[in-house]
Image (tube, helix red, strand yellow):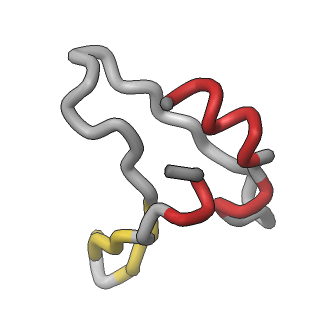
Amino acid sequence: MSYLRIKNEVITVNGKKIAYRELSKGQSKFPLVMLVHLAANMDNWDPKLIDRLTF
């Protein structure tokens, strides 16, 4: 499965919605959290890089 096909999930913190994608859930006890810069979005990541890191 490709990074771009993973469904976005949303949580609400202090009334603000935050979207995220969780890949390879439960595969490792050490999560890798990757953040983007302020004006970016999740689709700025190159799917080829993310797929190689997680699948």
In this image, 39 relative to 23: left or right?
right
In this image, 40 relative to 16: left or right?
right
Where's residue 35, x and y in %?
Answer: 60, 43
Please tell me in which quadrant of the rendered image residue 51 appears.
top right
Q: Nearer the viewer, residue 34 or 28?
A: 28
Q: Is residue 32 above or below residue 25?
A: above
In this image, 45 relative to 5: left or right?
right
Q: Is residue 8 above or below residue 52?
A: below
In this image, 44 relative to 7: left or right?
right
Residue at the spot 64% in from the left edge and 27% down from the top edge: 52
Residue at the spot 79% in from the left edge and 57% down from the top edge: 44
Residue at the spot 26% in from the left edge and 39% down from the top edge: 25
Q: Nearer the viewer, residue 7 or 41?
A: 7
Kindly give the residue lying farthest to the bottom in the view shown: 15
Where's residue 5, x and y in %?
Answer: 54, 65
Where's residue 3, x and y in %?
Answer: 58, 52
Count of marks overlaid on the render: 0
Residue at the spot 65% in from the left edge and 60% down from the top edge: 42
Q: Is residue 36 above or below residue 50?
A: below
Where's residue 30, x and y in %?
Answer: 30, 16
